[in-house]
Image: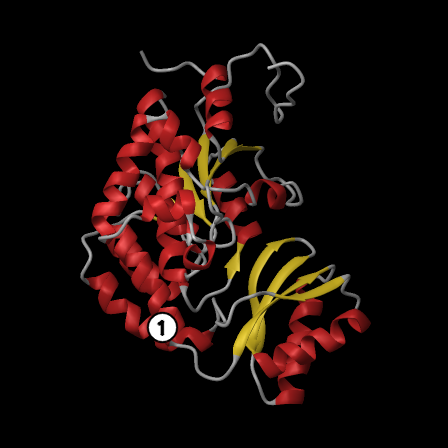
Amino acid sequence: MPGRTLPPPFRPGRVMPTSGVGLIFPGQGTQFVGMGADLHRRYPEARDVFAEADEALGYSLSTLCFDGPDEELQQGKHTQPAIVAVSTAIWRVLAARLDVSPIAAAGHSLGEYSALVAAEALSLADALPLVAARARCMEAAAGEAAGMLALLGLDRDAADALCREAATATGGYAAIANHNCPGQLVVAGHARALDRVQELARDRGARRAVRLVVTVASHTPLLQPACDAFAPRVAAVPISNPRFPVIGNARIRPLVTAADVRAELPAQLVQPVDWPATVSALAESGAARLWELGPKSVLAGLNKRIDGAPPVVALTTAKEVDVLLSQVEVRA
């Protein structure tokens, strides 16, 4: 398309290869009212996904995604299924039209569930109630006031030291929950410890320290009660061997069996997300290019700051999907 810049190594007029593709899926924070509506209008596969989602959940997730209200969509029990549904809709549109066999997949936190649905380890009908239960377990685990804080401009060692200092000073807990890319970290813990981290951050070299609008300390041991409550839910859900490997957040290794997946999902709640290590594992698996599938593109921006990361094509809208389909050989 005139004026459109394609990610390297592709150039206008050439057919984009579908070999060596890895899939990546974003997590919470990508939700917004209107998400998926253009896909629903454009593609029958997307309409089928939303119909399946509405039936699996027993309410109109599609209406909540397309029309809101925003305060309901922002509730974790709705947000988590909504993101998985939109991500799945995009994948099914592509899978129906392209002869593509992903090398591997990964997701950032919640995005791991979208990856597992794409790999057919979880059915969509099982995954959506499961992530809704995940959200409820996380919210129910809240004890002492807790939260998360974005730190920009610090490396991991400096952030670790800052968290230890804040924990010692306050008697609370703080630790890195997400390593998103060099210089972008999220720490989580008790509110009193995070307050101290925020006070000290500028003096320790951080460009910014911003509290996130959440009340749980995701991906830390403070969510162990959620992990314990969620494990029986995972045990009760049918899980298959993934059709292609999914790089797990908890241990940064490929999930290749149903047993791998079943062990991963509760553990993921209390283990930090190391996105650069996940991207490295995708590259080592043979992924030469990545497609990001979700309501909004977040991971493509992170990957630009990760050395050796494969190039990313963001696929979040019907228009972006149309552009991709115009650049590849579509299945007859």
Q: What residue appears at the point 57 percent right and 50 percent down from the top-left corner?
A: 276
Question: Does residue 314 appear in the picture of this structure?
Answer: yes
Which kind of residue does numbered mark 1 sit on? Ala
Image quarter of residue 10? top right
Q: How is the image coloured?
A: secondary structure
Residue 163 location (% of width, % of height): 64, 76
Image quarter of residue 158? bottom right
Residue 135 vs residue 166, the one in the foreground: 135
Note whether 253 is above or below 38 in the view shown: below
Residue pointed to by mark 1: 226
Residue 172 vs residue 256, the one in the foreground: 172
Residue 85 location (% of width, % of height): 35, 44
**Local crowd at mark 1 within 10 Å, few (<14), some, or many (≥20)?**
many
Q: Quadrant of the N terminus?
A: top right
Residue 137 vs residue 181, the one in the foreground: 137
Q: What residue appears at the point 38 percent right and 25 percent down from the top-left corner?
A: 42
Q: What residue appears at the point 61 percent right and 27 percent down from the top-left corner?
A: 7
Q: Quadrant of the C terminus?
A: top left
Residue 105 location (% of width, % of height): 41, 41
Question: Does residue 254 appear in the picture of this structure?
Answer: no
